Each structure stands twice: as C-alpha cells, then as structure tokens.
Amino acid sequence: MIPKKKKIKIPGIVILLIFVLIVGIGLKVLGFTISYLKEKQPSIATNQIKTAKTVKSLIYSPAEVIRPVEKLSDCQVIFQNNLFEPLGGRKLEPQKVEIVATKPQVEPPKPPAEKLNEITLTGIVYIDNEYQALIEDSGRGKSLYLKKGDKIKDYFVESITKDTMVLTNEESRLTKALGSKTYYNNNGKLLASGSQPSTEFVSKPTIQSDASEKEDANISLIERMKARRRKELGQE
C-alpha cells in the first residue's frame, strides 16, 4: 500500500505577514518614485521657462521682419557662387529704348513776291504854252503824255516844270525828276518808296518858233527819247 501524502497547512498569520511585507515594499517604492519626481520637476519647469524665453527672443516684430524694397534693381539674384563672375552668373538684359520720331515743323510756303510794274518819266516837253510829261508804262507797254490835272493811277498831276513832275493824292505828295522810275502794284496804286531817280536827265528843248516848228521838234524829241529808252532796255 502506498502511503498518503500529508497536506502541509500554512498558518494564516504567515500569509498575512507576507501580504503586509509586499504592501510595505510597494509603498516604499512608490514613495521613492514620488520624491524622485519632485526633485526633477523644478529643473523641467526651469527648462520650459528658458525655452519660452528663447522662442520669445526669436519672434520679431512685423516692422523688423518686413522691410520694403525701394527698387527691384537694388536686389541682386545670385544663381551660383563664382568669384570670377561679378554678378553671380546673372545675365543682364539690355533695356529697350523707345525712340519717338518727331516730325519736323514745316514752315508754310511764302507767297511769291508781287510783280510790280514801273512808270518812267522819260521826258518833259513844252506844247501849247504848257509843260507836258512823257512817261512809259511797262504795264501797258506804251508811252503817254500827261499834263497838269491828269490822273495817273491813284495820284493827280499837280504841276510840271522843266525838270520835275509833282504828283499828289489825299495821303502823300511825290516829286519825280527826269529819268526817275515809279512802281505800282496789281491794285493800281503807286508805291511812294519805289521811286528810283536816274542819274541821266533829258534836257527840255526851248521852242519859241511857230506851230509847225514846235510839232516837228516835239516829234524829233519823242523819237530820240524812245531810241534812248530802247537802248537802256537793251543794256539791262
């Protein structure tokens, strides 16, 4: 027969002591952990304060961070670090210069000079007990006799002497010598400043014979004056 094993009975007080021992060890470990954490907590708080100060010091105000650039040309973009290229490899594009063509001011054409006609006092003759002036009008292309009171353009013959002829109108008075020239425009007005006295004078013949001799002498004088005039025009 196999003998039966006897069961070992552990008294209850032993179990209680073991439980109390375990609980005591746990409390000691817990107290040690709490004290350790209390010692480390001030250093962690200090580190957090230092970190906050550092972050605060790194935060800039908008005025310090954003600075406006006056001109874009003041900024230089460097594409590569190359000491042999002063602009860092940046290529400068040539600026386009717009040339505005200015139209030259064209002056209006001047009107052509007005064509002037001339009247020349060719001679003075004595006919019918009075002096008469012989003139040549280039505008008409013929010779004319004038006596006192006759009208020539916008003037009247005031008087005729052996050497001169006086012309007058409401505005001025002109004295013309033998050989002098007077100009008039297309409106038929004499130009007071256009007279050009000639250096040659035609002597007045003194005729005191009968009527037939006077007429022959006058015709001869007229022919001589015309011949002299044609000679002058041919020389010009």
Image (cartoon, rainbow, N blue to C red):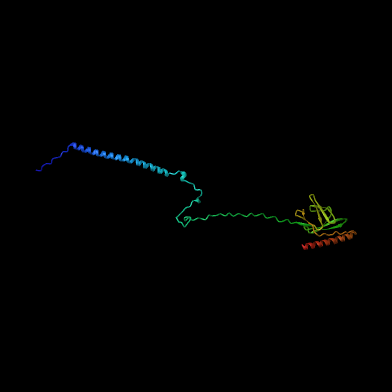
Q: Is residue 86 above or below residue 61?
A: below
Depth check: give the residue in front, 176 or 83.
83
Residue at x-position 87% and y-position 61%: 217
Residue at x-position 32% and y-position 40%: 39
Q: Quadrant of residue 204?
A: bottom right
Residue 63 at x, y percent in the picture: 47, 44
Residue at x-position 30% and y-position 39%: 35
Residue 64 at x, y percent in the picture: 46, 45
From this viewpoint, which residue is outermost toward the right?
210
Residue 106 at x, y percent in the picture: 64, 55
Depth check: give the residue in front, 168 or 17.
17
Residue 213 at x, y percent in the picture: 89, 60
Would you say 191 lies left or right of 64 here? right
Residue at x-position 36% and y-position 41%: 46
Quarter of the image where the C terminus is located: bottom right
Q: Is residue 109 above or below residue 3?
A: below
Depth check: give the residue in front, 211 or 205.
205
Would you say 209 lies left or right of 1 here? right
Q: Quadrant of residue 27?
A: top left
From this viewpoint, which residue is outermost toward the left?
1
Q: Is residue 61 above or below residue 73?
A: above
Total numbered circles: 0
Quarter of the image where the N terminus is located: top left
